[in-house]
Image (spheres, rainbow, N blue to C red):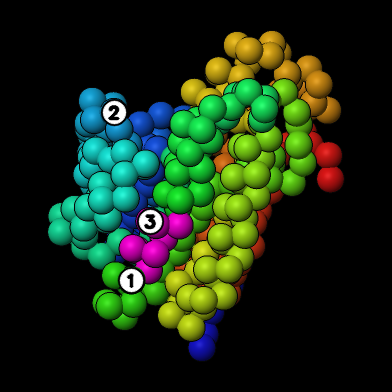
Amino acid sequence: MSYPLPNNSTDLSGQVALVTGASSGLGLRFAKVLASQGAKVAIAARRLDRLEALAKEIEDAGGTALPVQMDATDADQMVAAVAKAEEALGTVTILVNNAGIPDAQRAHKMDIELIDRVLDINVRAPFVLSCEVARRLMAADKPGRIVNIASAAAYHYAGNGAALYSVSKSAVVRITETLSVEWSRNHINVNAIAPGAFESEMMDGMLERMGDIAQHFPRKRIGNPAQLDAALLFLVGPSSDAVTGTCIRVDDGQGSR
């Protein structure tokens, strides 16, 4: 097989992407980036008004976007979201599991409802969605790319009420590793990105509770979502065909190793 020099394309023409948690923050940026490279994008979240505004922005820029209202705690809604995306745009070939929530509570103070919600959204949802997308890819005999959004917290515990969040994001990394093995023969690549502290609604809440945490980082800054573009496009683009089961840490040197 002949490859271009360099083999570094980010052309997503003909691809259909589904991005969860797309109504704000990282997910909103991911959807715009994928659309800018030619993918048709289904954007999923609970807040339909925000999705509709994002879809208009993408379409005004020449892209294609489909708003899909979805609650990441409801398995039926997740399966239906994949079906809606496929019906309107074609088989989903790129899935970005971005939806997530913090726990923001000391472990011994968490009630069962909060524990269940964190695990439902951060762990169960990406697993359910990945399996649904993979089933459809296998049925269509198509390759695919799944990118799970983990966190630097998967690798170290920063404290201040993030125990379950840290556990859940470690699970996301392990989901990535195990599913990559199961689906390798089907040419479905499963990878993850572990961001450090980046601008988002979740980060806004953390800064409100904890103050300017950036002053404790070596570079004294919070990351901009645009700094994740390259990692995302690498993992979903055609040139990373041999990359599966890995997690790329993009933490700006913020955390301990």
Res 173 → quadrant: bottom right
Determine the residue positioned at 77% across, 22% down. 220
Number of marks: 3
> Mark 2: few, some, or many residues within 10 Å (few <14, many ≥20)?
some
Taking the image as shown, residue 118 lies to the left or right of residue 75, namely right
The span picked out in magenta is: 127-134
Q: Which circle's residue, 3 or 1, is located before the other in the chain?
A: 3
Determine the residue positioned at 74% across, 46% down. 155
Tag shown at residue 47: 2
> Mark 3: few, some, or many residues within 10 Å (few <14, many ≥20)?
many
Residue 31 magenta-highlighted = no
Tell me if label 2 and label 1 are in contact, CB under 8 Å: no
Determine the residue positioned at 48% across, 83% down. 185
Residue assigned mark 1: 135
In this rendering, is residue 121 above or below 212? below
Q: Main secondary structure of the magenta part?
A: helix
In this rendering, is residue 14 above or below 158? below
Position in image of residue 30 (x %, y %): 44, 42
Residue 129 magenta-highlighted = yes
Position in image of residue 79 (x %, y %): 27, 55
Residue assigned mark 3: 129
Q: Is residue 253 visible?
A: no
Res 197 → quadrant: top right
Taking the image as shown, residue 30 lies to the left or right of residue 18, namely right
* Label 3, label 2: how far apart the Cα atoms are: 19 Å
Taking the image as shown, residue 82 lies to the left or right of residue 127, namely left
Closest to the observer: 105 or 60? 105
Label 1 secondary element: helix
Q: Amino acid at mark 1?
A: Arg
Q: Amino acid at mark 2?
A: Arg
